[in-house]
Image (cartoon, rainbow, N blue to C red):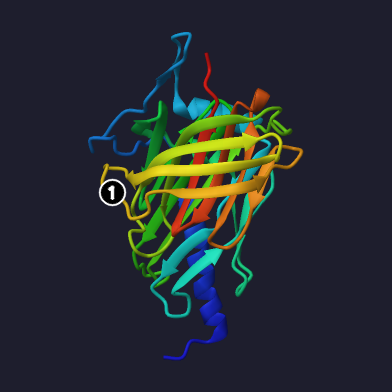
Amino acid sequence: MMIKQSQFYGQISLVIALVMAFFLSACGRGGGGTTGDSVDGMRGTPPQERRDDDTMINPTQQARSIIARTDSLISAALYGETSRDELPNFRIEADCSVEQCIYRETQSGIARFFTLRELTNVEPTLAFVDNDMSIYRSEENDTIRYYGLMNHSVFGFGTTYDQRSPRSNIDFWGRTAIVGGDLTRSRPESTATWNGIMLGTPSGTAGRTAVLRGAAQLTYDMDRQQIDAAFTNIRNQNGRAYAVRSIRFDDIPVTANGLFNDERAGDSIQGAFYGPAHIESAGVFEKRGVVGSFGVHQPTD
């Protein structure tokens, strides 16, 4: 059957609207307070971490504290597929400001928005702990997010799947990664290394529901004013091997305000240094069929 252009764009508009809502729908706009599945698959209560001074931290409260100080928001491109021949797959670049990221579909001109505040509308459960970092999981309907919280930044990714509905008659899948925090706003003053973890998912159709994790290391060379980023021991969340075991980015320049960026479709990294004395760094990346984020920090005494 021939589809009129206006009808096609109307359907694409709905697809993009649904895909862009993958973070928002996971946040429980209507109520909040629901929790996802815990590590062992049982329904769990929201976790709390313990500070060095032995006080407890609720992850939602911690996220709100970070967001209140956030002056940087960075997103990878949005990857996805639909069941329609007119839009079998897509990659939509993000345009981010301090307050929001905009994802604009160029054919239809449809734009959707994401704000970091949406991350705090639903309580998460603890997914796993890796390299002394707690990773949280939130779920609502068909949307799942994994994210990590440091003291000055948040990093994570989300995936969504929506089965064919009477409204759209379209199946769609979508996934992207995002980070935010309060910037250091300068280059590091000496050569140094930061360690942490990466979180991601396949950007292509194969294995698109997989949760990938691995070690992350960022090295800054003061003489070159560049960073090298290495993601190693990449594996599925359950420990099973993944085809891509490591990803590297080398010789990425760092700007005077502590940002780094090497943007090429499907082979890019963007990030920044966060907190006082460049204590943290976080960013997003796309490479070797993986879209993900990372959070690293310097050791503290």
Q: Nearer the viewer, residue 261 or 228?
A: 228
Q: Nearer the viewer, residue 221 or 86?
A: 221
Please tell me which residue is depicted at 40% across the width and 26% down the height of the picture.
132
Please tell me which residue is depicted at 55% across the width and 53% down the height of the picture.
76
Q: Position of residue 48 (x, y in %)?
A: 40, 22
Q: In the rendered image, which quarter is residue 115 located in?
A: top right
Please tell me which residue is depicted at 50% across the width and 49% down the height of the picture.
248
Q: Is residue 238 left or right of residue 290?
A: left
Is residue 177 visible in this depiction of the protein? yes
How many numbered badges does the structure rendering display?
1
Q: In the rendered image, which quarter is residue 42 located in?
A: top left
Please state which amino acid type lies under the numbered disc 1. Answer: Ala
Report the residue marked by disc 1. Answer: 241
The quadrant of the image that shows the N terminus is bottom left
Considering every residue shown, the one lying at the far top of the view is 53
Q: Position of residue 16 (x, y in %)?
A: 52, 65
Please tell me which residue is depicted at 40% across the width and 35% down the height of the picture.
136
Seen in the picture, residue 251 relative to 191 is either above or below; the reply is below
Q: Residues within 10 Å of mark 1 (few under 14, many from 20)?
A: few
Which element is circle 1 on? loop
